[in-house]
Amino acid sequence: MEIKGAVALVTGANRGLGRQFAAALVERGAAKVYAAARNPESVDLPGVIPIRLDVTDPESIRAAAAAAGDVTLLVNNAGSFTGASLLGGSLEDIRLEMDTHYFGTLAVTREFAPVLERNGGGAVLNVLSVLSWFTTPRVGAYSAAKSAAWSLTNALRLELAPQKTQVTALHVGYMDTDMAKHVDGPKVDPAFAAGLGIEAVEQGRFEVLVDDLSRNVRAGLAGDLTGLYPSLTA
């Protein structure tokens, strides 16, 4: 789809990757960019329209869809990271990860799908992760939720195709944001990731792998699991 002249809504747009998506959409000529956040007063980016949206609150989602009835591009970016493991983490934290990344993405997409259809089809961009395909105990809850969101994205792509709504998945490793501040090693500039995601939408691509980490892990899925988890051979 053409970004110039599009009307976009980005969830979690007040900081991190979401803020970079909103900024890039404005820069690339989107006619209107709704910057959605649980606290719209925290949105400080010039040229956008702050809008209240909590992806875990159905009433908030319905209100946002009613207020932004001209959307042609939905960017599902809002996320959470509790650091919960599946065996030792609290069930409350594990549910939050699933409520945000899986049920939240699903709820927002379900509410905006008719909006996109009325406006010609448009596109959905779901922000996923290399952790959709790989996990460690310390990120078990997050990885499980992102993996569910990957399957969700593939299913939505098929279900939305008849209304001519394209669905793109963005997978990225560690980015230079608050969520990965504890990680040592190379990190992707979120502005770079946002740019690649928008280009993928313009090109009608199903999937974009932002960095070498994502590409290598994606390729590793075709091999034996010990390739991704060498400790299993110990």
Image (cartoon, rainbow, N blue to C red):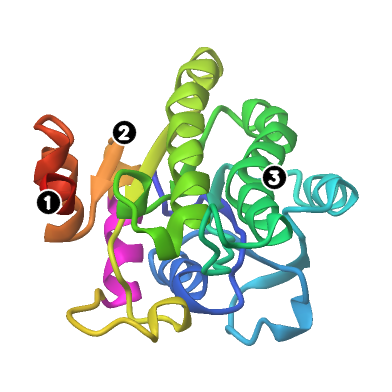
User: Looking at the image, which residue sits at the far front?
Assistant: 234
Kindly indicate the quadrant of the structure image that contains residue 33: bottom right
Q: CA distance from mark 2 to mark 1?
A: 37 Å
**Viewer-nearest residue: 121 or 105:** 105
Q: CA distance from mark 3 to mark 2?
A: 23 Å
What residue sits 32% from the left and 74% below the top?
Answer: 175
Q: CA distance from mark 3 to mark 1?
A: 55 Å
Mark 1 burial class by Cα count in 10 Å: few <14, some 14-19, many 20+: few
Say if 31 sits above or below 69 in the image: below
Residue 162 left/right relative to 191:
right
Mark 3 or 2, nearer chain start: 3
- The three-letter code of the residue at mark 1 reads Ala
Mark 3 or 1, nearer chain start: 3
Per the rendering, the mark at residue 234 is 1
Can you say which quadrant of the picture contains the N terminus?
Answer: top left
**Viewer-nearest residue: 61 or 87:** 87
Mark 2 or 1, nearer chain start: 2
Question: SS of the residue at dot 3?
Answer: loop
What residue sits 45% from the left and 66% below the top?
Answer: 21
What residue sits 87% from the left and 51% below the top?
Answer: 63
Q: Read off the magenta span.
A: 189-199
Tag 2 residue: 206
Mark 2 touches mark 1? (CB < 8 Å) = no
Per the rendering, the mark at residue 70 is 3
- The three-letter code of the residue at mark 3 reads Asp
Task: From the image, state whether disc 3 or disc 2 is nearer to you.
Answer: 2
Residue 104: horizontal and vertical position, in percent?
Answer: 68, 47
Mark 3 burial class by Cα count in 10 Å: few <14, some 14-19, many 20+: some
Residue 205: horizontal and vertical position, in percent?
Answer: 28, 36
Q: Is residue 174 magenta?
A: no
